[in-house]
Image (cartoon, helix red, strand yellow):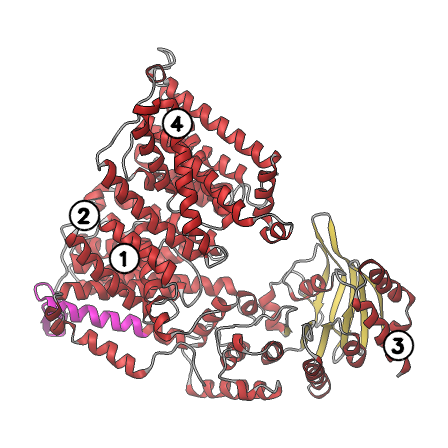
Amino acid sequence: MSLLEVRAASKSFGSLAAVRAVSLRVAAGELRAVIGPNGAGKTTFFNLITGALRPTAGAILFDGRDITAIPAWRRVVLGMARTFQITEIFPELTLAENLRVAVETAAGLRLRPWISRGAAASVRRQVEEMLALAGLAPKAGRLVGELSHGDQRAAEIAMALALRPRLLLLDEPTAGMGEQETYDVTQLVRRLHRDCNLTIVLIEHDMRVVFHLADRIAVLDQGALIADGTPDEIAADRTVQAAYLGQAAEAGAADAGAAEAGAAEAGAA
Amino acid sequence: MLQLLLFNVTNGLIIGAFYVLMALGLSLILNLSGVINFAHGGFLVLGGYLAYTLTPFLGFWGALIVAPLLTAAIGMAIEQTLIRRLYGRDPLYSLLLTFGLAYIFEDVTRYVWGAQGLPVTIPAFLGRPVSPAFFFITYYRLFMVAVAAAVVLFLFLLLRHSRVGVRIRAGTLDLETVSTLGVNVGRLRAFNFALGIFLAGLSGVLAGGQLGLDPTMGAGLLMPSFIAIIIGGVGSLPGTLVGGLLIGVASGVTAVFFPSASEAVMYVLMALVLLARPRGLMGEEGLLT
Amino acid sequence: MRESGRTHPAVLVAIWMVLLLAPAWLGLVGGYTALGARVLVLGLAAMSLNFLLGFTGVLSFGHAAWFGLGAYGTGLTLKFVAASTPLALLAGTLLGGVLGAALGALIAHRRGIYFAMVTIAFGQVFYYIAYRWNALTGGDDGLRGFSRQNLAIGPWSVDIVANGVAFYYFVLICFAAIVAIMALLLRSPFGHTLVAIRENERRARFLGIPVEFHIWAAFALSCVFISFAGGLYALLNNFADPNNLHYSLSGDLVIMAVLGGMRSFWGPLLGAAVFVVLQDYVSSLTTNWMSFVGLLFVLVVLFFPRGLLGVLRGKSPA
């Protein structure tokens, strides 16, 4: 059974249809990439899944349960964690404090006006574990706002992991990163997928990352799903090429070049 | 009884027109600059007192024009020297600054003009009742409503059709985009602030002719203006207009039946509106659309 | 684990020593014990407000309403119901706390400027009630005709009516109790969620925190704390008046928090001390003290937006 199922979800803002009747199934344990030209509606689609926005039509199912009408925070409790395109963290708190909030909330302690020594120790252990997993242990005491961009992105992923999710949604995890940082994040995502057997959906612009990681790829264009398949199928898909080429013709975007390069690379492999 | 009701409804409309003038100024500044101008009542009082001082030299009509302009100029000077520094910061700071300014205004007006009430002298014919049957309606009251209506009409036309008005409306919705289009946002805000303060000054002159002036009256008029904005919906000038008239009439009518509750009714109205429509009556719509 | 914003133990000891010994040293520097009690009470009010403002990031500009309700509730209980100081204090706290919690439920989904405006406007409701309901509240003249009562602890009776120093220590014990509760809350998982909401509401929501509910809880708690402070204020003065509920007191409380440093736990107490002493001093010199208070607002906003403790720490918020 699929862990996440989106049934003909649509979202309009006034007369603008940002997402049009997109259906998608993500199986447990799968790593699914969502790609598409700029303005294709990828982030809006994410917002529908995570509850930041309510769909105009259609339904979202998580683990077989209809979650279309439940608020965002409750979806997190059900096991759905996300990161954002622009890093969302608690800048004036230390890295460890950032993670502590996540761990405590995930442990159901959020309304506790006190905490036992045992529980506090357990929280501390989990925080350290997450820091180690994200490779951030030496920076535990630093204010997150003072960390490098790459470390902040990693911190956000670590916070999402601290929630012990069953489904992790990553919105452009490598956005604005250099070569080395992109590589590190890619390795982290791969580890999470392989070793922790986590179901992951990610939006990504860097086609090398996408074709390197994804089991399946969904392609959005102008709010509609135009293709959904394995990396090989997507690389060979004419509609997808047209969508990216169309954008390249309009804006001369580097993305399309990357898409072609990525597709070629994947085809060669 | 009917006479009394009529009296209080007209009275409510007149007071409402007043709240509208004041609240529109507050609303303009709030919408474009994100500043809750606590000193708005202070500017109103200043306008009134300036008119009091100018009337012997310029006459009522001269003062009616010059005093609000002077007030607006003072407002713009304060905006340029103090408030401008706080744009983009936590709204807490501009709130506290204007709060402090309100204290200073009240104290300074008391120091300069004294604590006792002063009248703004109005032309004799405006003081006469319209007719014996409607003895309670003086020409001055009609005049106040006419001025308020004309100003509101002018303001809405300005915002809809003039270049600066369109920019103010666009800036209210998305200031960043407006600035990337090459509009000088600093000047736009300064003009908009001065416009808001002009309305406050004008209300002050009009109020002075009807109620007389005293240093604390500004603070008393501030709360109804807040409520007008909240009822109408923050961000919507037509909402402010409706909200101001609504609370004016509501308190007028209440004054007939429960005189002591005439202020409280505004708050009740606000609570009811917020329960039914959390964004206020016209809060969801865009500006002036 | 390093904690951001925790007070150094040595500073903590110093604060409590200063407060404990106040009746001894206040006279030496030209103060008086009642002034010390006033600082404690308004400091507690500013700290209660700051629980919301500085630690949850929610700008309530109508908190005087809950302070004043605490004062009236306490005064009315002493006058009409029971001659018991603790009971009156409890009644005042409940009055402000319950009404605050009710309003909080109505507005917890509002933010920023709108929240500030709505809290100011609703706060004024209670001002008008106190101002108008002459028969019960004494209207404009304020509520008189009640007095705090001596404390009965087992077989002993503690004189806090005539003995100003004993009353100071009574206030200090009350202050310590509420401050301890606030400090423990802020160190608890619940407190951590509040700071998280202040830092980034969206992130907090997507960690699985129902943000509106937590903001409501923080608002209600803050109302309970400040009502308690208001009750103490009524006991201090044996008097309550509509100005205890007016939004200008709300503004004064906010400036105390900002002046002291709203990101630090003890900042508002320092701010209250500076504000109260300055006001006491300036109003003894000139009738134009309002200008000085106004000027203080302007100067704080322009030059000390992070407050005195913020300047001392030299750590800049982003």
Q: Quadrant of residue A216?
A: bottom right
Task: Using the image, determine if residue B224 lies above or below residue C172.
Answer: above
Q: Which residue is mark 1?
A: C70
- Identified at 80% across, 69% down, the residue is A218
Q: Position of residue A268 (x, y in %)?
A: 90, 82
User: Numbered disc 1: what chain?
Assistant: C
The answer to whether dots 2 and 1 both sit on one chain is: yes
Instruction: Tell me the quarter of the image containing the N terminus of chain B.
Output: top left
Q: Residue furthest front?
A: B57
Q: Which residue is mark 4?
A: B64
- Marks 2/4 in contact by CB < 8 Å: the verdict is no
Instruction: Tell me the quarter of the image containing the C terminus of chain B.
Output: top right
Q: Which residues are magenta?
A: C151-180
On screen, residue C153 versus residue A5, left or right, reads left
Q: Position of residue B168 (x, y in %)?
A: 57, 43
Give the residue type that dot 4 points to. Answer: Leu
- The CA distance from mark 2 to mark 4 is 32 Å
SS label for mark 3: helix
The answer to whether dots 3 and 4 both sit on one chain is: no
Q: Which residue is mark 3?
A: A264
On screen, residue B58 versus residue B228, left or right, reads left
* Eye-nearest disc, 3 or 1: 3
* Eye-nearest disc, 1 or 4: 4
- The CA distance from mark 3 to mark 2 is 82 Å
Sequence-wise first label, 2 or 1: 1
- Marks 3/2 in contact by CB < 8 Å: the verdict is no
**Crowdedness of circle 3 by 10 Å Cα count: few (<14), some, many (20+)?**
some
Task: Using the image, determine if residue A93 lies above or below residue B277.
Answer: below
